[in-house]
């Protein structure tokens, strides 16, 4: 029996918070939530695929409603199906969305397409009756590993938040089973950030490692100054020191920071990923790549990015996506990535994982839920059901 898309719904919703990183505050942050409704029925319910964009980029309702969703609606339904005609084909849907789009300019449209792509994959896996991570593994001809490394992201600047509150936050992550925690730097002076880092390291002791994230704030001089300070500490990584497109800065920084570095969350295409690996001085034996499918045209494009990663001599296990969402978690389990970010307390209801999951020794075990698994997170699926209604 063939399948067709009967409706696409989008709403832009606030995920506002008084937190800030080195570059932006989140007091007006939004996200787009979409529902792709199919005419298939599984387990007595109509199949609806859901998606949303990662935090840090605003909702893309205008682009979704005015440009990309209409292309799907107006397409011949048969042109969106797999060769067997029994399920949607994410690659064909993606090609339909990107019809008549010029190359380059990987900015806001990559977020809009990535949001819709997430919902398409959720629907495809539900129609197939499989968790997305198992569907992806089957298609890749590999055995999935349901056990995935996750780290806790937080440590934002916040009005009135001192080192005592920062220590308590990081301690709470360790107490919940995380073995790597991440905090922001670059939003204060170097001396103040150094004191914050030392306070956290003292708090977590040998029970966990600390990663730091500058969110692209630094020029080369400042990035080097921080590198010279940071290299005295056993950090998990030094993240996104400079502008994401300043490959020369990233390459130069390797001369001053021998420890692991991470970047890539603000690169939104496989071409940009290739340029980072060509010119950014990234080291495949120690550094980490953070490309986020939900911000970069979705999983269809992310698979091209993984091919670029492999062609450059890197293992997919060096990829730990940004965003803290379940889509990247499914990709990590299904395609053998190194892990996934998580926001245990922030950006709710979109941050975090299904309610039943426990973090043990820095890992979770994927639930056997059809699709991406949104139905396992009560506050998130409630918002999604409200949209679909």
Image (cartoon, rainbow, N blue to C red):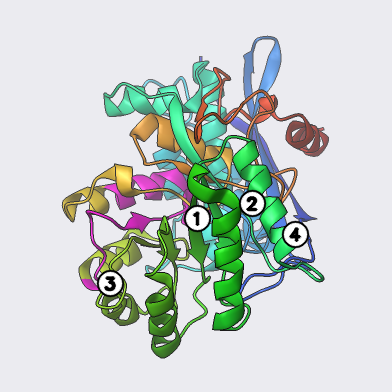
Q: Is residue 47 left or right of residue 228?
A: right
Instruction: Identify the element where label 1 is drawn.
Output: strand
Q: Which residue is mark 2?
A: 170
Q: Is residue 309 above or below residue 377?
A: below
The one nearer the camera, 356 or 190, is 190
Inter-mark Cα distance, 1 to 2: 9 Å
- Asked if the residue at tag 2 contacts the one at tag 1, i.e. Cβ–Cβ closer than 8 Å, the answer is yes
Q: Quadrant of residue 221?
A: bottom left
Inter-mark Cα distance, 4 to 3: 36 Å
Q: Which residue is mark 4?
A: 165
Q: Nearer the viewer, mark 1 or mark 3?
A: 1
Instruction: Identify the element where label 2 is drawn.
Output: helix
Q: Nearer the viewer, mark 4 or mark 3?
A: 4
Instruction: Identify the element where label 4 is drawn.
Output: helix
- Upstream in sequence: badge 4 or badge 2: 4
Q: Is residue 177 magenta?
A: no
Q: Which residue is mark 1?
A: 210
The one nearer the camera, 373 or 150, is 150
Q: Is residue 129 above or below residue 81?
A: above
Inter-mark Cα distance, 2 to 3: 31 Å
Inter-mark Cα distance, 4 to 2: 9 Å
Q: How dense is the environment of label 2, judged by Cα within 10 Å: few (below 14), some, or many (20 and up)?
A: many
The one nearer the camera, 100 or 322, is 322
Q: Which residue is mark 3?
A: 280
Residue 177, percent from left and from top: 58, 35
Q: How dense is the environment of label 4, judged by Cα within 10 Å: few (below 14), some, or many (20 and up)?
A: few
- Upstream in sequence: badge 4 or badge 3: 4
Identify which residue is drawn at 44% across, 74% down.
241
């Amino acid at each position: 029996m063939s399948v067709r898309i009967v409706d696409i719904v989008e709403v832009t919703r606030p995920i506002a918070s008084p937190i800030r990183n080195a570059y932006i505050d989140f007091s007006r942050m939004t996200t787009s939530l979409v529902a792709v409704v199919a005419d298939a029925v599984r387990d007595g319910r109509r199949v609806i695929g859901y998606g949303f964009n990662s935090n840090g980029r605003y909702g893309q309702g205008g682009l979704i409603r005015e440009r990309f969703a209409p292309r799907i609606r107006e397409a011949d339904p048969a042109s969106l199906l797999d060769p067997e005609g029994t399920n949607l084909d994410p690659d064909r849907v993606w090609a339909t969305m990107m019809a008549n789009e010029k190359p380059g300019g990987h900015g806001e449209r990559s977020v809009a397409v990535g949001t819709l792509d997430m919902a398409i994959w959720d629907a495809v896996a539900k129609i197939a009756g499989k968790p997305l991570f198992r569907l992806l593994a089957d298609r890749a001809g590999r055995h999935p590993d349901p056990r995935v490394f996750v780290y806790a992201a937080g440590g934002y600047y916040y009005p009135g938040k001192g080192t005592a509150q920062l220590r308590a936050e990081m301690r709470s992550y360790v107490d919940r089973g995380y073995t790597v925690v991440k905090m922001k730097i670059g939003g204060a002076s170097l001396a103040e950030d150094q004191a914050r880092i030392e306070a956290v390291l003292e708090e977590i002791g040998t029970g966990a490692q600390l990663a730091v994230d500058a969110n692209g704030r630094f020029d080369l001089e400042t990035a080097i100054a921080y590198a010279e300070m940071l290299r005295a500490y056993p950090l998990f990584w030094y993240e996104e020191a400079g502008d994401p497109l300043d490959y020369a800065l990233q390459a130069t920084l390797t001369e001053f920071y021998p420890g692991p570095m991470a970047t890539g969350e603000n690169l939104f295409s496989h071409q940009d990923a290739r340029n980072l690996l060509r010119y950014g001085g990234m080291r495949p034996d120690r550094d980490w790549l953070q490309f986020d499918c939900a911000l970069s045209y979705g999983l269809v494009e992310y698979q091209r990015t993984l091919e670029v990663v492999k062609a450059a001599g890197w293992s997919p296990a060096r990829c730990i996506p940004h965003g803290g969402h379940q889509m990247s978690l499914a990709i990590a389990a299904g395609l053998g990535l190194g892990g996934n970010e998580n926001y245990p307390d922030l950006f709710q209801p979109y941050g975090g994982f299904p309610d039943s999951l426990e973090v043990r020794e820095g890992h979770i075990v994927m639930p056997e839920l059809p699709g991406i698994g949104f139905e396992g997170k009560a506050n998130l699926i409630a918002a999604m059901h409200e949209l679909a209604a």
